[in-house]
Image: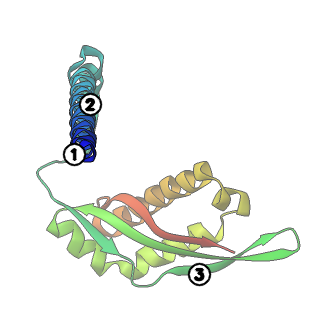
Amino acid sequence: MADDNNDISVDGESQGGGKKKLIIMIVALLLLLGGGGAGAYFFLFSDNESVETEAITEEVSTEIDETLQAIYVAMPRPFVFNVMEGKRDRLVQIKVQLMVRGDENQTLAKKHIPLLEGTLVRIFGAATVGQLRSPEGKEELRKFALEALNKETMKVEDKGLINAVLFTGFVLQ
């Protein structure tokens, strides 16, 4: 009989310990959720953040006509070319998509794909290995490509068609 009482008390203690662990886990979870909620509140509703967000929104709205939908025009094939680094040739492959605004600009960009490809080949061929390796160099190359593409489309359509040049694949060997 004494053995039966020990078994019962051991089981009772293990259940009590399990209940304590469960209560501790629930309290910890509630504290974690409360802290996360408070952090999100302060992050989203602080005065400094809202001022910066408004400034960025105003800046973007002046540059881009928001009534037109962003459409991506993929270049039909990747650009593959060699770049010299000292005495060594490096092979580069860049996949490009162009962001335009509106159906009309999409149609015009597709119409002038050969002109756009030729312009990008000229720009990418003039790039250096250092420029292609660094993030700043890639960003500079992207901006230069955007300016050159819009300059070329101004000649044939009297307006810049491209809003952004995006590198969707980039390999330097």
Mark 2: secondary structure: helix
Q: Quadrant of residue 45?
A: top left
Mark 2: few, some, or many residues within 10 Å (few <14, many ≥20)? few
Q: Quadrant of residue 100?
A: bottom left
> Mark 3–mark 2 contact, CB under 8 Å?
no
- Between the residue at mark 1 and the residue at mark 2, the CA separation in whole angstroms equals 35 Å
The residue at the point 37 percent across, 79 percent down is 113
In the displayed structure, 121 sits above or below 15; it is: below
Question: What amino acid is labelled 3 in the image?
Answer: Val
The residue at the point 11 percent across, 51 percent down is 67
Q: Nearer the viewer, residue 48 or 143?
A: 48
Q: Which residue position is annotated with label 3?
A: 80
- Between the residue at mark 3 and the residue at mark 2, the CA separation in whole angstroms equals 60 Å
> Which quadrant of the figure contains the N terminus?
top left
Mark 1: secondary structure: loop
Q: Which residue position is annotated with label 1?
A: 1
> Which quadrant of the figure contains the C terminus?
bottom right
- Disc nearer the start of the sequence (3/1): 1
Q: Nearer the viewer, residue 8 or 38?
A: 8
Mark 1: few, some, or many residues within 10 Å (few <14, many ≥20)? few
Residue at far left of view: 67
Q: Which residue position is annotated with label 2?
A: 24
Mark 3: few, some, or many residues within 10 Å (few <14, many ≥20)? some
In the displayed structure, 3 sits above or below 118; it is: above
Mark 3: secondary structure: strand
- Disc nearer the start of the sequence (1/2): 1
